[in-house]
Image (cartoon, helix red, strand yellow):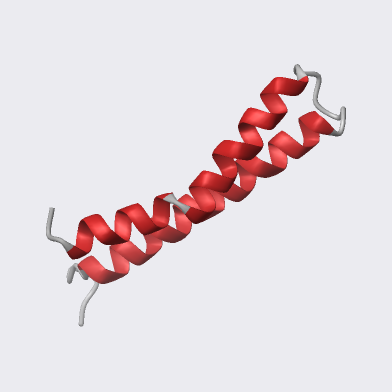
Amino acid sequence: MGQTDHDPAKARFLTIQAVRLSGVVTAVLGALVLGGILPLPEIAGYILVALGVAEIFILPIVLAKRWRSGQ
């Protein structure tokens, strides 16, 4: 297998991991806002945490189901 071969399963796996990582970063930023370290309104912290949790737990499942169904 050379470097020119494209493996869709590997690309999808890496995409799901990147989505999860971005969710962790988003949730941590929200926690920093809630902890008063970042100077943003408290509601922004709650929104960031909620979005981060959705990226970590919900979005990978949605992507996997979409790819499994062939869409």
Q: Tell me the quarter of the picture where residue 26 sits.
A: top right
Vertical order, 32 against 19 (above or below): above
Question: Viewed as shown, does residue 15 lie left or right of 43?
Answer: left
Question: Viewed as shown, does residue 16 lie left or right of 27?
Answer: left
Question: Viewed as shown, does residue 27 lie left or right of 9?
Answer: right
Vertical order, 28 against 14 (above or below): above
Residue found at the very far left of the displayed protein: 70
The x, y position of residue 30, in whole percent, is 70, 35
Q: Tell me the quarter of the picture where residue 1 sits.
A: bottom left
- Is residue 68 or residue 18 the one in the foreground? 68
The residue under the point 30% across, 69% down is 10
Residue found at the very far bottom of the displayed protein: 1
Count of marks placed on residues: 0
- Is residue 18 or residue 31 the one in the foreground? 31
The residue under the point 19% across, 67% down is 6
Question: Viewed as shown, does residue 67 lie left or right of 12?
Answer: left
The residue under the point 63% across, 33% down is 48
The residue under the point 80% across, 31% down is 34
The x, y position of residue 41, in whole percent, is 75, 17
The x, y position of residue 21, in whole percent, is 55, 53
